[in-house]
Image (tube, coloured by chain):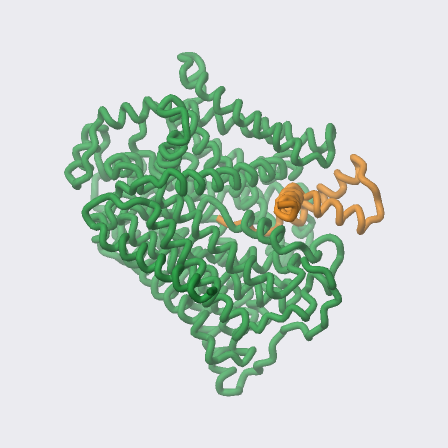
Amino acid sequence: MLRIVWALIAIAAAVSMGVIAQSQGEPVNSTWLVVASVCTYLIGYRFYAAFIAAKVMALDDTRATPAERLRDGHDFEPTNKWIVFGHHFAAIAGPGPLVGPTLAAQFGYLPGFLWIVVGCVLGGAIQDFVILFCSIRRDGKSLGQMAREEIGKVGGFTALITVLLIMIILLAVIGLVVVNTLKGSPWGTFTIAATMPTAIFMGLYLRYWRPGKVLEASLIGFVLIMAGIFGGQIVSQSPTLAPMFTYSGLALCFALIIYGFFASALPVWLLLAPRDYLSTFVKLGVVVMLGAGIIFLRPELQMPPFTRFTDGTGPIFAGKIFPFCFITIACGAVSGFHSLISSGTTPKLLGRERHALGVGYGSMLLESFVAVMALIAAASLHPGVYFAVNSPAGIVGATPAAAVATISNWGFPVSTTEMATLAQGVGEQSLFYRTGGAPSLALGMAQIFVQTGGGQAVMAFWYHFAIMFEVLFILTTLDAGTRVGRFMLQDLLGHVSPKFKQTNWLPGMLGTSAVIVAAWGYFLYQGVLDPLGGINSLWPLFGIANQLLAAVALCVATTILLKMHRLKYVWITCMPLVWLVVVCFTAGWQKIFSPLPAIGFLAQADALAAGVQGPTTATLIFNARLDAAVTGVFLFLVALILVDSIRVWMGILNGSTSSKTTETPFVPTKLAEEL
Amino acid sequence: MKRLLAILRGIVDELTDQNAYRRYLLAHGVVHSPDAWREFQDEHWQAKSRRGRCC
């Protein structure tokens, strides 16, 4: 009977994929994408991941996990698997799986969809699962510690530096998404500004008035941010108030830099903690709403399966489908950042080894499904509208008339009247040149939500609700990331002067906060200044960096599999590793050396130097060369780890390097109860 | 249904740090008080804010 069920699931996956592949000329219903992805996930989980769990890792529920052996009531605590699943999913799901697929929709919905599903099942979920397993068998050690112990000191140090650099690029690029979303939008800016006093109020409420009542404070916070959305509408319609909340990209860039500094330096309970609670609940709520909306309303995809931009001439970011589709979508398919979570809190909470399958592999499948939903939301917009919102003025023309003419000439008809009506419908002055993915995703989400009731009258509310959700989410990542970067820098500087390791030492705290904020702030500034909208430069840089971190994690995982004498199974980690190395190095090489100025940073610098010199030309040239250097550093660092890993692998295989694993010895579990 | 509600409650407690707080109270042998919560909050977030967060 069970075999028949699985056969039906496999047939459903094959039929759905077939329908998607065959529907070239007419809109395809999103249900096919939902069925194809869910069935593929189920098959991947039941057969591929279960095979790895049984044959490769030999997960053993009689073996005590670190949560049991090292139980301390703080970090290590055996916890119910569903609770750990919720915790792990909340930690891995950031803005990436929403923004990346939205941007990659410029190639059409099919390349992104296939990469999200296949990349996740064979790569991303494998990375998360294997690293979680490795960490469980090593007392919950971090990726950096495992890299140092399994590969060597070079690997460990390189992993640390890579993470710090990725963090800086990540914070800059998500900051740019915020800037591009809020520029010229008094409604959005007011709504987001209102979340700050709301978070501080929640912080004080939890600290002094109702200590420990997190759910209560979160509910109050939610009511206040909802009030902020309605307040934003009033502000946007007021001739006096609207100008007070209407800012240029540059002004928002500096506001964000100042905000980042204070968010990093302020006591954590005052801003970061309450915002984190609020953001988590809003995030989970919206993901559930979007999922329910897509499943019940079954929107049709307006975007074709492939667009003309597979040839590399895309307006949102330049570059051919290979390799750029695969670095644009990182979170949702393969994300190196997940390896930090899989070797962070999660391994310290799992009470049974076999729970790693559902938590490590299963959580990633769910995140991948979130990415599919974001892709559906973006692809359900009319392509003309999608490109008008996401294309920078430097590509499509500096006036709305020029922009619609360019986009219509590409074969995606759109008019200024249609865009003006749409902007008016969502309470914005204009929706042109809103690069970064967030506004178009908000439009797509709002179009789905309005169908649940209320019609076009509530379109503006849902649009700004989606904007609030995305920006709140991003700002929480920005706050937390700046603080993590600050601690990492303090740890590094602590090797020079031990005083820096004291996290409450004010000069050290302020100094390192300033350095981290200045670092991502500069990249954000260059993105705002970029005539091509910034996303064209920064998002690929972030994608390359994130995927390279995944390559580092897979190097560690492969080394451990070899030390476990699982040579015949190393293809499981080597397959995604080889793919990521090829994709990232091709993309990195093209970003540095491509002769096309739209792609290659150096060619861009040369073209700027040869062109008309304006007041910002020298800065733009410097920025392009800086981006080339940063890409080069990423490639060099990962090449270093790769070469070091291959040296260790060869040593293990020919017997010159010890294959002694650092796995903790077997201790039988004493946990009787089912967790 | 009861089990599902218990799991949902558990996830909410995990996300609102109530599970971690209960463990803290047990480990320190203290009962809930405003001061205990503040001490927990400082210790818990000091550690939590050092950990990477995904994009």
Chain B's colour is orange
Chain A's colour is green
- Left-right relation of A441 to A398: right
Residue B30: x, y in percent? 84, 44
* Residue in the picture at 38% in, 21% down: A457
Q: Please identify the quarter of the rendering in which residue A401 is found.
A: top left
Q: Residue furthest front?
A: A1
**Residue A626 visible in the current orientation:** no
Please tell me which residue lies in front, A562 or A425: A425
* Residue in the picture at 29% in, 37% down: A386
Please tell me which residue lies in front, A658 or A365: A365
Residue A333: x, y in percent? 41, 56
Residue A54: x, y in percent? 54, 72
Work out which quarter of the rendered image holds the C terminus of chain A and state it.
bottom right
* Residue in the picture at 68% in, 64% down: A66
Q: In this view, does A654 lie above or below A599?
A: below
Residue A449: x, y in percent? 41, 32
Please tell me which residue lies in front, A180 or A596: A180
**Residue A21 visible in the current orientation:** yes
